[in-house]
Amino acid sequence: MECSLNLSDVYVFKKVASTLSFTRAARQLGVSKSAVSKQVSRLELNLGVVLINRTTRSVNLTEAGRTFDAHTAKIDTTIEHAADLVRGADLSPQGTVSFALPSGLGAALMPALAIHFPGHWPELRLNIQFDDSVQDLITGNLDLAVRISKKLPDSSLISRRLATTRKVLAASPKYLQEYGTPQSPSELEHHRCLGLGSTMKSGTSWKIPDGDKTIDVATSFALSTNSNLALILAACLDSGIIFVPEICIAGEIARNQLEIISGCADPEPYGVYALYPHRNAATKVKILVDFIEQILPTVASLDRWTPLSNRFVSQSDTKCIDAYA
């Protein structure tokens, strides 16, 4: 007949065996003496043998008790070692943090995440998912997600606001010089608009302020994609107008690669939020959130394009690039 042992019962028995006292075992475990006695009795019932002889004056192991104690000798050290590993992981953070970032913002943060973060926390590994959709943290096995939103939907997730931004219309100076700068949202229908879309639809509606009111501007995208990063790149290549959070293009604006179209920004603030599943987040997650929060105000100084072009473009590559100019 198979018996189903409770590991907690075995652990309690080991404490009694090592102290030869129900009272001392209870004190070490931080429970009542009756609770210890109950768990030992349950273990004996499951095994079908008496492990401990109890009298009012003494506690001694039976022969079965000594045999069982000897063959479970590693349980104490294994449990304590596991506990030390968990405590140590919080005291000296290590391991992997899996998290999701909006593609436009994530790519802007890559110089800091790829270069500066490892210098501060060399034992931590980053698993970054670039995703402009709303991922489920639990099913996606994510420790953290950063999202940009006016208002977060009600959920059980823990949120922390890291920064605020606004949504703006922007295009390259060359595009605006060639096609003109829209003076009102209604003029967008005469421009190349680039936006998030899918194979199921070729356009959508942009909510853009017009004076004292916000209007829905129906757009038929000249280019649509599921990635804000791709839209930003296309806009930098003079392909059209995008409508994105300003924080995602702060670097391009600072370098005059993109220009905000004045008077058409969404006046309502958007929050940049860190979301995680548990209030008592692991230290490694808190470290990453703190790092991102510190980096966000400097995002305009982080150049996601130039370091790569300086490093990898050879003389022969330049000829190929010039062919498209």
Image (cartoon, rainbow, N blue to C red):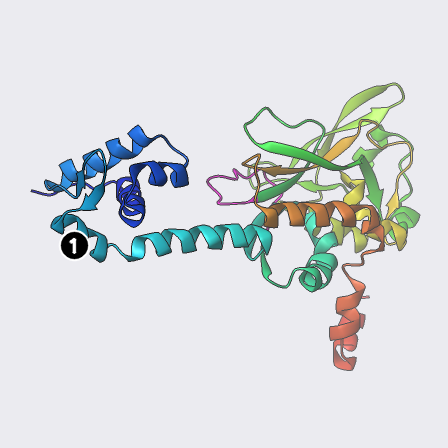
Question: Which quarter of the rendering shows the C terminus?
Answer: bottom right
Q: Which residue is mark 1?
A: 67
Q: Which residues are magenta?
A: 127-143
Residue at 53% over, 45% down: 142
Foreground of the two, 166 or 7 = 7
The type of residue carrying mark 1 is Thr
Percent position of residue 206, x then y: 74, 30
- From the viewer's perspective, is residue 185 above or below residue 81? above
**Magenta stretch contains residue 298:** no
| Secondary structure, magenta segment, majority class | loop
> Residue 46: which quarter of the image?
top left
x then y, percent, for residue 236: 80, 54
Quarter of the N terminus within the rendering: top left
| Whether residue 140 is visible | yes
Q: Nearer the viewer, residue 218 or 236?
A: 236
Q: Is residue 29 left or right of residue 203?
A: left
Q: Nearer the viewer, residue 34 or 306?
A: 34
